[in-house]
Amino acid sequence: MTETEILVIGGGPAGLRAAAAAGELGAQVLVIEEMDWLGGQLVKQTHKFFGSKEQYASRRGIDIARILAGELENHDRVTVWTGAPVLGIYEDGMVTAQKDNRHVKIKPQRIIVATGAAEKVLPFPNNDLPGVYGAGAVQTLMNLHGVLPGRRVLMVGAGNIGLIVSYQLLQAGVEVAAVIEGAAHIGGYLVHAAKIRRAGVPILTRHTIKEAQGREVVEGAVIQQLDENWQPVPGTEQQLEVDVICLAVGLTPLADLLWQAGCEMRFIPELGGHVPYRNRLLETTRPGIYVAGDVAGVEEASAAMVEGRLAGLAAARSLGYGGPEAEAYLEDALRQLHALRSGPAGEKIRRGLEKLETMEGVPC
Amino acid sequence: MRISEHPIVQFNKGTKVKFTFDGRELEGYEGEPIAAALHAAGVRILGHSPRYHRPRGFYCAIGNCSSCLMVVDGEPNVRVCVEKLRAGMKVETQQGKGVIR
């Protein structure tokens, strides 16, 4: 059995920042990551980030992953396990994981769950054909492993992921037939939309996919216009010759461990689905279990990093670490989060958080 | 199809190794996911669903969705989107739920 003061589950932007912050205050930390590498989904983000310099703005995600992982290298209070999926959080506070093909037990005093999110799927006929891929999957295949997903892609969803992955497909030499979006407006940053439009890719708002075509693999797609009530308009069907249909229709928190641990969960569509109740320092309804990053509500990596720092500081402080300066650090992290969410792009997040906070019985 | 030139990323793929897919000899790079090696070789159908025998490919590519289960060296239900390729691996499409030996 391994004992640790703070266990961080997940080595993405939130988990790595949580570990660094808790270690900085003097706590002993174990980070456990299921993949063989640190950085989570940052390792495939070849584009430059927005935000401020505290969240490494204007650097590429792939470089931020290296910086964050580097902060924990040779750290005397932070231990990192990679290739080790966590299996469960038990009633007595024991955590189990798989490490080197063995079942291991960990006994932490505090837990920070930073497990991230998974891609959503869209229902339409033949959506299970090989060639229908999540946008993140296409990024992984292309930017991490150097393999092209296909020759010609239909991108479904014009949020930031749909727009950015479309641009990355073009960079890799793949044709993008169109980007379609069910809503009346492009959801992502217009600077990303402008880049792919300049490259000649049409972005069709109020359009959806009617079906994927093909017997064994994707050979085409039929798209269709939607009216203002999101109903398909008959006679507007268009057939596209594509071998890949890429779904960029949002993410949902990977909250299985929180459910299992008995944390109270609430359904907030603005935050991606079921999210944990928590106080402003990100502690859930199960005392000693904190959350950070997409598992707490789907946002951008910049917010995940700040949430990670906040949860790391809060967990370490609850163990008695950090003097008066810990208060100042916490206030600074809260200020950064507020700033990140204050613009028009943060409107949906603000709405979701407000819903969560005003729900009955919230321990905030 | 592999990316030979990219404006931002350099791919250092390492050692080329041979493996088999349903008895057919293919090549990939050691340590990359089996699914990446198969996709680069043009293989997109990784198995068929248990009930309706629908073709299955990968979906999430990060080990979450279980759409890419295959039989690897005789072991069924291996998530090939995260399982690393090694020389001489025997990779087979899985029919149904697979049998644990």
Image (cartoon, rainbow, N blue to C red):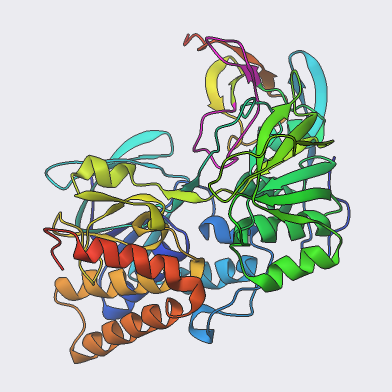
Magenta region: which residues? B47-68
Q: Quadrant of the C terminus of chain A?
A: bottom left
**Quarter of the image where one finds residue A125:** top right
Please state which of residues A362 and A326 is positioned toward the viewer in this rendering.
A362
Residue at screen point 49% across, 8% down: B99
User: Where is the N terminus of chain A found, in terms of image quarters?
Assistant: top left
At x 58% / y 62%, what residue is drawn?
A: A187
Residue A256 lies left or right of residue A222; in this view the side is: left
Image position of A170 with respect to A89: above or below: below
Task: Residue A363: give x, y in percent of width and height.
Answer: 13, 64
Determine if the magenta segment contains residue A342.
no
Q: Main secondary structure of the magenta part?
A: loop
Asked if residue B62 is among those painted magenta in the image, a careful observer would answer: yes
Image vertical order of residue A313 relative to residue A148, above or below: below
- Identify the residue shown where x is 68% and y is 60%: A163
Q: Relative to A320, is B87 on the left or the right? A: right
Left or right? Give the position of A304 relative to A223: left
**In which quarter of the view is residue A49 placed?**
bottom right
